[in-house]
Image (cartoon, rainbow, N blue to C red):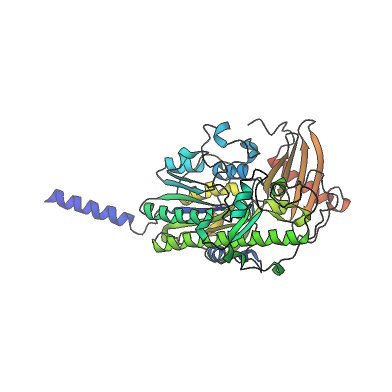
Amino acid sequence: MKLRTVMLLAVVCFTLSGFGQEKKPNVVVFLVDDLRTELGCYGSTHVKSPNIDALAKDGVLFDKAYCQEAICAPSRMSILTGLHPQNIGIYSLFTPLRKKHKDMVTLPQFFKANGYTTVSIGKVYHHTFDDKESWSIHIPKESNAYVLPENIALQNSGSGKGSAFECADVTDDAYKDGRTANHAIETLQKIKDEKFVMFVGLSKPHLPFNAPKKYWDMYKEGDFTIPVKKAPEGMSSLALTKWGELRGYHGIPKEGLLDDELSLKLMHGYYACVSYIDAQMGKVMQALEDLDLRENTMVVLMSDHGWKLGEYGAWCKHTNFELDVHVPMIISRETSHKNRQTNVRSQALVENIDIFPTIAEACELEVHPVDGKSILKLVDNPEMEWDKAAYSIYPRGEKYMGCTVTDGEWRYTEWRNMDEHNTHSVELYPCQTDFNKVGENLAGGEKYKGIQIKMKKLLDENFSPERISFYTN
């Protein structure tokens, strides 16, 4: 009888000791391809992004978030390892992570080892089967697909990539991001009783700009203003590209500027795709509510990099300009979290590599050393002081490396010649949101000498001028 009483008391004490303690959260990350900060919640008056805007109202929006390289594969590797590209040593689309680094510990690998069900749906890594073994559930990205017969024929003709855009009167799941949302919802239903980290990789608004007609119908081409087609005066000859990513599509001229009619059509397609993926995200968010998972699920929305829509007379990404490295980032804590912040904007400088250690800390896990820094304290206290700089990088072949830093007010870039171990050119620009104010490269100007000295010092803290090569990792 005494033994039974002692055992009963032990059970009661154990139960009471756990009462009121918060459970470790699940995490859902929406990783979007080529998404600019041009969203309703970031101040756009013409982009229709109601679900992303709703997430921002339900969490913390970061005004000054930056990717580490404005190209898909290296950026995503940085996100999933928490490391700067120069510490991974991969700067292009062509080398999968595991081809170079067999033993590097990745985000899904870390969480899987700590008892989490790890889920990859859609485009998470650029190379869809890269690091496949680290995911408990892996639903790979699909290839770019058209639904209109004439575009399918064009794609199969062998003459190029196909059309740069498509507007078809079809359901959402006729295109791959609709199916990605469906897979995410089905997977949530299966794993709702497990602890999980899920990445939902939404491929649009990446080219080609294919979206159901109802999303095209949300806009009129008269809604858009064509940017000034002029590059900054005095910029480095290495700063911009010839945007071959777009030029490979049917109907896009192989050289020169785009005419206004084609520019407006491409802008229309881009914004239609933004509204399309916004709706897919909304479906997954609704599933979290319907399955009673949102109470204990932290949600992140982020992009691998930005994109140019004709600014400077250029398109695509692949540069160190603010338009390409500035990214949207929204973090919304699980609704049961006691110190939850909502409808707040943070002006702190944060980086995509911060996401790995942030969600690890949210799940009460201690991550191995990485370059990123947990911003969980910022999520709970968005007004606190934070880091003084954010860094990005972009190569021009294997000879030149563009190293760039921002302090939130200025952007400073050095194009370093790795063969001759000197600096090819330097750029200094004020950070801005109105890219019709083209401006000029202010590096070397006597009036800005103090600013340039300050920014160079910040740059050298992350990119040592003594570094001989960026390809030794």
Residue farthest along the left direction in this orientation: 1
Judge by depth and name the residue closer to the eye, 345 or 103. Answer: 103
* Residue at point 56%, 67% (across, down): 50
Residue 14 rendering spot, x and y as whole percentages: 28, 52
- In this rendering, would 460 be left or right of 41? right
The C terminus is located in which quarter?
Answer: top right
* Residue at point 73%, 59% (across, down): 263
Residue 98 shows up from this direction? yes
Image height of 51 relative to 66, above or below: below
- In this rendering, would 366 be left or right of 243? left
Residue 470 rendering spot, x and y as whole percentages: 69, 34
**How many numbered marks, from 0 up?**
0
Residue 85 rendering spot, x and y as whole percentages: 63, 40
Image height of 344 relative to 74, above or below: below
Judge by depth and name the residue closer to the eye, 376 or 92. Answer: 92
Residue farthest along the right direction in this orientation: 446
Residue 336 shows up from this direction? no
* Residue at point 35%, 53% (across, down): 193
Judge by depth and name the residue closer to the eye, 194 or 268. Answer: 268
Residue 469 rendering spot, x and y as whole percentages: 71, 32
Residue 459: quadrant of the picture: top right
